[in-house]
Amino acid sequence: MEKITVLTETIPCSLAKLIKTILRRGKNVGGEIYTGHPAVTRSLITGLKKLGAEFNYNPKKIKEVGETVIVLSGVAVLRQAIKLKRRGKIKKLLAGPNLMVFSNEFNNILSAKEIDTCLVPSDWVRIAYEEDAPQLNGRIKIWPAGVDENFWQPDNTHQKNKIIVYQKNAPQELTEKVLEKLKILNLNPIKIIYGKYSADDFKKALQESSLAIFLSRSESQGIALQEAWAMNVPTLCWQPSELTINGRKYSTFSSCPYLSESTGKIWQTIDELENMLIDYKNTKTLFTPRSWVESNLTDELSVHKLLKIINDLDNSKV
């Protein structure tokens, strides 16, 4: 397999642009620098390292670009990669999974013939992308990022007597009803608001919790869910009856694409949630979320899936 280049930023063409790029980068868990969607980028880079793959990440010069390029995020980055493909610098170009909400945005750039494969994080996103851009039929592959099961590892010395209420983009009224229901059932909630916590904050809350309630109207993948599962915390996930974004009503969608019998349950009404909470409180229903992550979505397993996608692309061109 050829050298892989992972891109989340355009390749600088001058020293001034290079300095600007370095200054705007942010730091993630462990002090490493990951741009684009940090959790997705981190998972890919970590997995490639663990598997000993030949790769580079955001090279500083065009001549350092490998023959296989993955553009994780950034429409400007994708435009640059398409130009490099036209020049013959790139042999295989994969784009996604964090480029845009709608597949026909930016003048249908995702449908460009230079892009060999469009990556999406789950099947419902694939369906939506193909509905909005039929040209992508047969050119989309599902690739979910993994999680670091070593960082997200439970410490059994903590007393797990709390329940996380994770609020992302659900109605505030629903969140209040959930918190009130927990109070009535004498259950101790920890409220976590999306975008307002650090990885260490979330990990600490998970250490103290036996269960998490997720309130999100949709998730393309749900990495926070996977982090909870890696900490062996099962999730009860609210699933709304419909999803409309900017006037676009989805034929299918999910608030927890990778939920399974091992990792939790779905609910729609407060009454359904109450029954689940009572059942869990009385019987401690057996879930095995960490085992599921270890068998399905660690960084290494995620990158194995991606390398197979690349390998299959090689074979299809033979």
Image (cartoon, grey):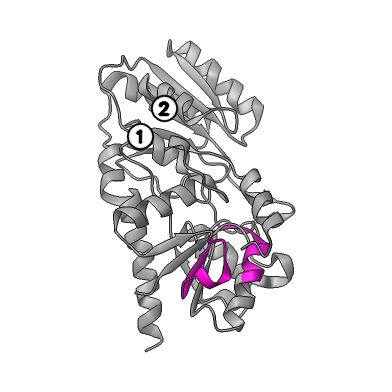
For disc 2, the marked residue is: 203
- Say which quarter of the image contains residue 207: top left
- Magenta span covers which residues? 59-80
Q: Nearer the viewer, residue 19 or 74?
A: 19
Q: Position of residue 285 (x, y in %)?
A: 27, 29
Do tag 2 and tag 1 residues touch (Cβ < 8 Å)?
yes
Residue 70 sits above or below residue 268 on the image: below
Instruction: Say if the magenta span includes residue 166.
Output: no
- Please provide percent x and percent y for residue 75: 66, 62
Residue type for callout 2:
Lys
Q: Residue at x 61, y 59 (%)?
A: 99
Image quadrant in which the N terminus is located: bottom left
**Residue occupied by mark 1:** 152
Marks 2 and 1, how far apart in space?
7 Å
Instruction: Please rate how many residues cluster around mark 2, counting C-alpha atoms within 10 Å: few if below 14, some from 14 to 19, many from 20.
Output: some
Q: Quadrant of residue 314?
A: bottom left
Residue 83 drawn at (x, y percent): 64, 77
Q: Residue at x 49, y 33 (%)?
A: 214
- Residue 318, located in which quarter of the rendered image? bottom left
Q: Is residue 3 visible?
A: yes
Q: How many marks?
A: 2
Which mark identifies residue 64?
none
Residue 69 among those drawn in magenta? yes
Horizontal side of residue 242 vs 310, given as left or right: right
